[in-house]
Image (spheres, rainbow, N blue to C red):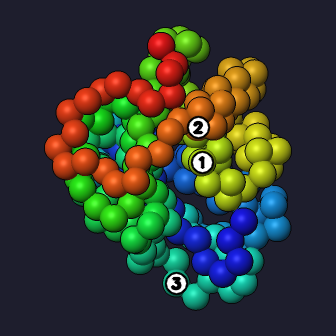
Amino acid sequence: MPTERWEACLAGSGGQGIISAGIILAEAAVLAGLNAVQTQSYGPESRGGASRAEVVLSDGEIDYAKTTQADVVLAMTSDACAKYAGKIKAGGMLIVDDQVDRIPAGPYRMVRAPITRIAAAELGRAIVANIVALGVLAALTEIVPMGALEQAVLARVPRGTEELNRTALRLGFEAGRQTGLLTQAPANDSSRTSTTGVP
């Protein structure tokens, strides 16, 4: 958990549930006893346009709601990765879906995880990729306890989908724990091979 200030930028395209993921992460942090601020932006199209959620967490007062030097950027698309990887502070972390095929070089650790593939292939519902992504993020950063995150997820998802989303979160968490870290993101990395070993 952060002792002063921790920043995350979650980015992708409309329809991927990025905004919902940011809200859930902030609510989980509050459940864990932290202060949280969440802001969002999205393109004019409800699906396919750019979408971004920023989350700032602290155990003290938060005097500025926007990310300035992100500890983590989670990018679900190549466009999002190209646009927001530069927001990561030195030594921070870039988490990308393994369908992202262009990754800028930078002084950060990079994690590639099969977020969309888990949602679509293992669960048969690509729509829960945002919940899988939260599980990956939680495993890699340990920023909020898994119990608080699960509680926040279940409070937000539609009735009747609780078990699906609980499974998505746990599969994401397992994938995140298995994922290896690279010391620096390679420029123009076109590999789509996951480092998690999930087929």
Q: Residue at x 65, y 30 (%)?
A: 174
First along the sequence among labels 2 and 1: 1
Within the image, what quadrant is residue 101 found in?
top left
Disc 2 and disc 1 in contact, CB within 8 angstroms: yes
Residue 140 - label: 1
Q: Position of residue 52 (x, y in %)?
A: 40, 55
Number of numbered discs on residues: 3
| Mark 2 and mark 1: Cα distance apart in space | 6 Å
Which residue is the site of mark 3? Answer: 64
Q: Position of residue 79 (x, y in %)?
A: 23, 46
Residue 171 - label: none
First along the sequence among labels 2 and 3: 3
Report crowding for label 2: few under 14, some 14 to 19, many 20 or more residues within 10 A (C-alpha): many
| Mark 2 and mark 3: Cα distance apart in space | 29 Å
Q: Is residue 82 above or below residue 54?
A: above
Amino acid type at image mark 3: Tyr
The one nearer the camera, 138 or 185, is 185
Q: Residue at x 47, y 13 (%)?
A: 199
Amino acid type at image mark 1: Leu
Residue 116 visible, this orientation: no
Q: Secondary structure at mark 2?
A: helix
Disc 2 and disc 3 in contact, CB within 8 angstroms: no
Which residue is the site of mark 2? Answer: 176
Residue 105 visible, this orientation: yes
| Mark 3 and mark 1: Cα distance apart in space | 25 Å
Q: Nearer the viewer, mark 2 or mark 3?
A: 2
Q: Residue at x 40, y 53 (%)?
A: 183
